[in-house]
């Protein structure tokens, strides 16, 4: 084939040019994203329980729902968290489950369960986890130089108008951008109309709250439309409500004893902000925050350009509004992609310079330099055909593959040059040089690609995630091999036909570069042969060192990434309101100093529609904290934790990663160790006391272990005396209406104003609980008034703020923030203490257990990888023994990988283990090439020792060049910041360390092992 191609250079060049043009066209269609587009196997169910307590909601709604959900196909885990009025059920599926069908099945289970749930319950919302639901960024809107709160702590009318403007104008303008799917908003303050009755007038006239309610509702009758014929015409006559504003409400007529009153004569009617369940603060100021959701399929760069243009326009149009962007994913994407792109460029340049130092002419490096961009462009063509995006995973695959792409070209060019030096003609040298190395090159490509096949056995989403990396390397290697054996020999022949300026430059470089590699290698190899026992001892120590370092290195799921932002979730563990929560946050964060660059505070319940994790109460807050540097963030965390312990000792704080596409896929929000304490049987009202006693015992026996206090919900229970109510003619309905009205919870109707529904509340001024009980009266049928306090008993109780349950039922999670060395002790003590209490049992989970499982899986993956490599090598060499010799290189090279991880302060995680698996496929390529050359020389009649020396001399430069180009292509990754660089750094470190040791093993140890085998059996394949 090579002979055919080199004599048809125009056809070859035109074909290559056509493919390159297609690749350049495909570049415009390859999407750019942060992470690969994969299904996240998770569905969340949000339950709105109204005024139900956590215990009522768990028993009446959540528990029946869970019993239906555990029957789902492909279910991995289900976990529910129930609090007052709200519940969140998270369902995780086994990776590979078709999420479209799973979403339909979950909805079917919910519909089936609805028949057994309370009739007035709103249907739970089922939300499928999707990368497109993660906001591109959050846009905060605040009034410039104005707080939005007056001196009495009340919302100003100006801020109410600003809220309406942000919702109706700014939001709509952003949603008009084609790349924006929707704008999810929170922090809005909605108006309400309060009707405050004059209690003295009502008592004097013998009227009750029921009379006012009936009068208002009578005016809200809506009959609908009537078709009316008038001569030859017909009209739709609509008879509806005349209530549209406060004035209409005030003019409602009420008749009492032949006297007619208007509502405004008996009550004060005013428009006020609705009772707030949540608020948003940006740097201490009241704000409205908008989560910008990207349209599915839209390119991130197009969205960013459109949003920047729209933001610039709005800043000019509305100068009184301050626009601020936080949690910007576009910045994360740009930094990650640009950083890895720079690594790709510098890695290619360094590898290119290495070729100039080793090769003895200028033409060969230039030829290889031509092959690299052609291979890269063709790779992008296949990216488009296989629907692979340019992301931090696929880019890392290209960076990893760039050194391997150069390897194929180096070996082909070097082998052709060697045949020319032997005196062969230019065409014959091209043919022989390519044909001789084609089989080992093909075997090398297959072994490198084969190491990715076992990664599909990784559980969860991580196995599928690295499909892009595997495909990028596989495509790169296959394209590189094709370019090396087709295009390069044609170009080599063309540029060497004439001896022009490049030839003279090459001769000059050859004089400068006269290092005698062959002599130096022969001297070193003979030295190893003289001290074989010492050589085997050294390599044995290295293999033993691999096992020792594996035990020493810390195990974790993912590498630690530099972070300058975090989400702090605070549960004050006290029944405080939203205003008090705001005050505490402003007070604490105001003393953080220069470390805190900016912050957002989501206080209490939020109004986001797509926030699948929301389950906050008014006494909880989520803080987005952004620091300038990583050490500044750690200082902020320490300061916040210490201040909470000092001023609010009952508060519970947790720090989480900020939501982005990476954390959605690799979310590991588990504590290192979690003890799931489950009640064996229902022990009723004594459960809380026994649980509190058990947790106290754990704290006493584990004094050096960090444990969070139990989050309690303080409750006030009002119990009515039913017998007394019957005696005095006070119905339950009357009591309920009176109390709801007193607490401003009695909604009579809603008015439609400017396309908004404004509730009309029959209530009064804000009062304390004691004032309500003392001042609220109920009117019986005989027009007698009684104080509600005469029929009620008040009691203080407490229950768990959040009730957690899973497949095993309800349990209480105790999180231990410990390291791996403390795990055994903590587990033993916990089992001992819980075992002494017959009412409870315990099971364990957490990231330590998951990490141990992952490391075990990766060990299996490595074993399967070595087995596949053995099969490929056995097929190539037609031998069952030679593959063992080549694969002996892997455990020795691992010592270098583990040692480099140790000195760089890294551990064994998913990325470093993938680096080791990939290294296992790459490192044996040099040995494959060398072993193939040794066998060929033996077949040509060379003695065993002579074949070893000559093969080492002939393959020394290619081995050194291929190793150095692979290493140098990865070095820029270690110097790259951002998510992409830090994520791939453990992979690069493991690969570089393994390659350095593995190169020495290929040069000296593998020939030595083959020598021991062949000299005893006269072994020749």
Image (spheres, rainbow, N blue to C red):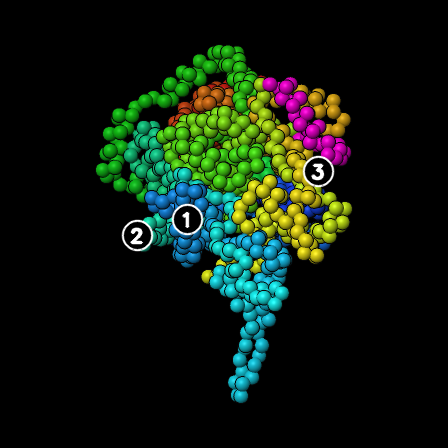
Say which mark, if any, is on residue 9: none
Residue 119 point in image, percent of width and height: 69, 54
Residue 803 point in image, percent of width and height: 65, 37
For the point 65% across and 28% down, the residue is 675
Query: Relative to 311, is 454 above or below?
Result: above
Determine the secondary structure under disc 3.
strand
The image quadrant where one finds the C terminus is: top right
Q: Residues within 10 Å of mark 3 (few under 14, many from 20)?
A: some
Residue 677: tell me if it is visible. yes
Residue 900 point in image, percent of width and height: 46, 22
Give the foreground label among 3 and 1.
Answer: 1
For the point 38% across and 22% down, the residue is 518
For the point 58% across and 68% down, the residue is 222
Q: Residue furthest front?
A: 204
Residue labelled with disc 3: 809
Residue labelled with disc 2: 316
Of the image marks 2 and 3, the number of the one nearer the N terminus: 2
């Amino acid at each position: 084939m090579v002979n055919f191609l080199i004599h048809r250079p125009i056809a070859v060049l035109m074909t290559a040019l056509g493919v390159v043009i297609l690749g350049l066209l495909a570049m415009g269609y390859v999407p750019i994203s942060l992470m690969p587009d994969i299904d996240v196997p998770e569905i969340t169910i949000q339950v709105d329980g109204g005024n139900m307590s956590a215990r009522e909601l768990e028993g009446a709604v959540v528990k029946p729902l869970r019993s239906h959900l555990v029957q789902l196909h492909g279910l991995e885990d289900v976990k529910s968290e129930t609090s007052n009025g709200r519940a969140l059920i998270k369902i995780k599926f086994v990776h590979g489950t078709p999420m479209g069908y799973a979403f339909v099945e979950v909805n079917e289970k919910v519909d089936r369960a609805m028949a057994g749930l309370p009739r007035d319950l709103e249907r739970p919302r089922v939300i499928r986890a999707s990368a497109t639901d993660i906001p591109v960024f959050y846009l905060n809107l605040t009034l410039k130089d104005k707080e939005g709160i007056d001196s009495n702590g009340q919302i100003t009318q100006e801020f109410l108008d600003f809220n309406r403007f942000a919702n109706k104008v700014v939001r709509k303008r952003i949603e008009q951008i084609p790349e924006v799917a929707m704008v999810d908003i929170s922090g809005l303050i909605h108006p309400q109309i309060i009707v405050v009755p004059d209690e003295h007038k009502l008592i004097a006239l013998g009227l009750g709250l029921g009379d006012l309610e009936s009068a208002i509702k009578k005016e809200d009758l809506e009959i609908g439309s009537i078709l009316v014929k008038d001569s030859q015409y017909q009209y739709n006559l609509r008879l509806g409500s005349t209530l549209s504003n406060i004035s209409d409400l005030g003019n409602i007529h009420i008749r009492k004893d032949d006297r007619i009153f208007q509502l405004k004569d008996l009550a004060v009617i005013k428009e006020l902000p609705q009772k707030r369940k949540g608020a948003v603060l940006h740097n201490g100021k009241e704000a409205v925050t908008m989560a910008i959701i990207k349209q599915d399929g839209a390119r991130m760069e197009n969205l960013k350009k459109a949003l920047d243009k729209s933001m610039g326009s709005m800043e000019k149009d509305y100068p009184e509004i301050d626009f601020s962007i936080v949690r910007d994913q576009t910045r994360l994407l740009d930094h990650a992609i640009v950083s890895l792109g720079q690594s790709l460029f510098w890695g290619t340049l360094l590898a290119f310079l290495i070729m100039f130092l080793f090769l003895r002419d200028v033409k060969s490096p230039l030829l290889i330099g031509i092959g690299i961009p052609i291979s890269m462009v063709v790779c992008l063509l296949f990216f488009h055909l296989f629907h692979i995006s340019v992301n931090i995973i696929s880019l890392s695959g290209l960076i990893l593959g760039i050194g391997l792409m150069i390897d194929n070209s180096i070996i082909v060019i070097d082998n052709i040059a060697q045949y020319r030096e032997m005196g062969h003609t230019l065409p014959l040298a091209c043919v022989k040089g390519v044909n001789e190395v084609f089989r080992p090159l093909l075997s090398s490509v297959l072994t490198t690609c084969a190491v990715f096949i076992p990664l599909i056995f990784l559980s969860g989403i991580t196995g599928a995630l690295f499909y892009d990396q595997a495909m990028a390397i596989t495509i790169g290697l296959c394209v590189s091999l094709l370019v090396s054996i087709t295009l390069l020999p044609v170009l080599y022949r063309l540029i060497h036909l004439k001896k022009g300026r490049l030839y003279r430059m090459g001769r000059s470089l050859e004089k400068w570069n006269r290092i005698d590699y062959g002599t130096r290698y022969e001297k070193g190899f003979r030295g190893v042969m003289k001290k074989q026992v010492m050589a085997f001892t050294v390599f044995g120590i290295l293999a033993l060192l691999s096992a020792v370092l594996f035990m020493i290195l810390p195990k974790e799921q993912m590498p630690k990434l530099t972070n300058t932002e975090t989400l702090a979730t605070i549960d004050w563990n006290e029944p405080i309101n939203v205003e008090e929560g705001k005050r505490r946050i402003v007070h604490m964060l105001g003393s953080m100093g220069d470390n805190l660059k900016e912050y957002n505070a989501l206080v209490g319940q939020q109004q986001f529609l797509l926030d699948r994790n929301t389950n906050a109460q008014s006494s909880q807050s989520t803080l987005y904290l952004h620091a300038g540097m990583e050490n500044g963030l750690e200082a902020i965390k320490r300061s916040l934790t210490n201040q909470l312990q000092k001023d609010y000792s009952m508060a519970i704080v947790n720090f989480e990663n900020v939501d982005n596409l990476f954390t959605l896929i690799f979310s590991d929000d588990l504590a290192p160790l979690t003890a799931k304490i489950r009640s064996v049987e229902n022990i009723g009202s004594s459960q809380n006391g026994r649980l509190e006693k058990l947790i106290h015992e754990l704290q006493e026996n584990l004094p050096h272990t960090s444990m969070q206090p139990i989050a309690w919900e303080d409750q006030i229970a009002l119990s009515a005396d039913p017998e007394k109510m019957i005696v005095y003619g006070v119905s339950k309905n009357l009591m309920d209406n009176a109390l709801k009205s007193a607490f401003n919870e009695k909604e009579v109707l809603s008015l439609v104003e400017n396309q908004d529904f404004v509730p009309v509340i029959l209530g009064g001024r804000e009062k304390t609980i004691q004032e309500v009980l003392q001042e609220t009266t109920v009117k019986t049928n005989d027009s007698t008034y009684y104080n509600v306090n005469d029929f009620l008993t008040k009691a203080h109780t407490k229950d768990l703020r959040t009730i957690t349950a899973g497949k095993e039922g309800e349990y209480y999670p105790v999180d231990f923030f410990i390291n791996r060395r403390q795990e055994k002790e903590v587990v033993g003590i916990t089992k001992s203490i819980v075992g002494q209490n017959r009412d409870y049992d315990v099971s364990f989970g957490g990231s330590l257990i998951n990490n141990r499982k992952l490391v075990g899986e990766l060990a299996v993956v490595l074993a399967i990888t070595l087995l596949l490599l053995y099969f490929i090598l056995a097929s190539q060499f037609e031998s069952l023994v030679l593959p063992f010799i080549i694969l002996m290189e892997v455990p020795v090279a691992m010592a270098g990988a583990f040692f480099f991880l140790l000195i760089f302060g890294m551990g064994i995680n998913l990325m470093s283990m993938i680096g080791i698996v990939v290294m296992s496929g790459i490192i044996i390529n040099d040995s494959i090439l060398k072993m193939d050359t040794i066998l060929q020389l033996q077949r040509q009649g060379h003695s065993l020792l002579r074949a070893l020396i000559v093969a080492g001399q002939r393959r020394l430069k290619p081995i050194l060049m291929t190793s150095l180009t692979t290493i140098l292509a990865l070095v820029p990754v270690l110097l790259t910041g951002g998510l992409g660089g830090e994520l791939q750094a453990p992979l690069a470190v493991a690969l570089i360390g393994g390659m350095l040791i593995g190169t020495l093993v290929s040069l000296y140890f593998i020939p030595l092992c083959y020598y021991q085998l062949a000299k005893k059996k006269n072994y020749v394949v």
